[in-house]
Amino acid sequence: MDNRRLECDQAKNLIPLAADGQAAAQVQVQRAQNCQRSMKKSHMWLLFGAAAAGTTLFALFAVFVWLFFFGGFPEIVKGADNYTSEINRLVNLKTGCVHTGFICFPEELPKGISENDAVFYSFYQDTLFDPTNEVFLEVKYGNQDYAAEINRLENTCKTYAYERRTLLRGGKNYPYPAYVAIDGSDYTLEYAMLTGNNRIAYIYLSFMSNPKKLRAVPVEYLPADYATKMSSLRFDAYNIYVIPQVSNDEAHAYDYSRNSLETVEDWHVVSINENDMFSVCTLHYPDRSERVNYCVHRRGDMKSDKDIIVNGDCIPEAHGKQFVAARLDGNRVILTCSDDSGEKEYFYKIK
């Protein structure tokens, strides 16, 4: 481009040497004009190239923002045949992508179930901080499979050290009887709902605050207070996956496993006097039974801040019985248990 500019400048500065050199001068003028036109075209191409480069960079930035912040194209899976594989895929995504273990949902559908009896839809879009997720399954069970599934929901629980949590009963805010794992905690809902005629609808929603944007879950299957449940973090809302906090200073932690097979140890304490206590150790089982493990009479040692066992294993005949209650009656502790023959009282006399 610099050579062309020099050539044009030379053409402008040429002076004809004689009158009969007018033709040559005109040629030089023409050459100068051509050079100017060529430079204008070069400038236009440079501007066009810069604009194209800017447009490309903007487009690349827009694509980056769309993918990074908004998750790009959503992943959509339909059909009951894809249910088990899709649930397993969602559960095994990296930590933080899916805020559930799908404990309300069955691990697999009954064998031989027809396409007309099962509807499945999964929408997943991984955005920057939290995913947008909608999972819907509705199954019409045969009588035997329906009874088995109700039994599973009744006995589904998670255990954390000395605490055992079951699926919460939905209450009046749900349009049908419901078993709830997450009741609007951290912008999330997970529940199984008995919609009648042996049908059960399983619903998981994460960061889907606008019911009009739902793609599969019928609006009439949402709780009446849906907007309130999905409008804030609500860490105080029921969530079967939240690990109990030892102190208020600890951050919330989650266990998204489906394990419901462990027993949980619990203690029922009867205060005898300022120093003595009677403790009943029980075990909670997944079938909702709470059975006596052993009983201990303790006395507090105020000087060493330790318990002294006055009588260990006080009422061995109560072992394995269903715990009902324990209370103090004068100089006796009365332990009430039940079995197939009914309730029975066991006594421990305080010496």
Image (tube, rainbow, N blue to C red):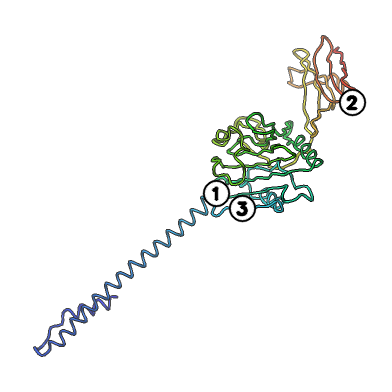
Q: Name the mark on residue 76.
A: 3
**Which residue, given by chain and number where applicable, does mark 1 sit on?**
127
The answer to whether 180 appears left or right of 208 in the picture is: right
Q: Are marks 2 and 1 in contact (CB under 8 Å)?
A: no
Q: Name the mark on residue 293.
A: none
Nearer the observer: mark 1 or 3; the answer is 3
User: Hey, which quadrant is residue 255 in on the image?
Assistant: top right
2 or 209: nearer the viewer: 209
Disc 3 on helix, strand or loop? strand
At label 2, the amino acid type is Asp
Looking at marks 2 and 1 on the same chain, the residue that comes earlier in the sequence is marked by 1
Rounded to the nearest angstrom, the CA distance separating label 1 from label 3 is 15 Å
| Image coords of residue 92 (percent x, y) | 68, 50
- The residue depicted at 62 percent of the width and 30 percent of the height is 173
Up-down relation of residue 237 to residue 211 (above or below): above
- The residue depicted at 29 percent of the width and 75 percent of the height is 1
- The residue depicted at 52 percent of the width and 50 percent of the height is 70
Rounded to the nearest angstrom, the CA distance separating label 3 from label 2 is 51 Å
**Which residue, given by chain and number where applicable, does mark 2 sit on?**
340
| Image coords of residue 45 (percent x, y) | 33, 70
Nearer the observer: mark 2 or 1; the answer is 2
Looking at marks 1 and 3 on the same chain, the residue that comes earlier in the sequence is marked by 3
Disc 1 on helix, strand or loop? loop
At label 3, the amino acid type is Ile
Nearer the observer: mark 3 or 2; the answer is 3
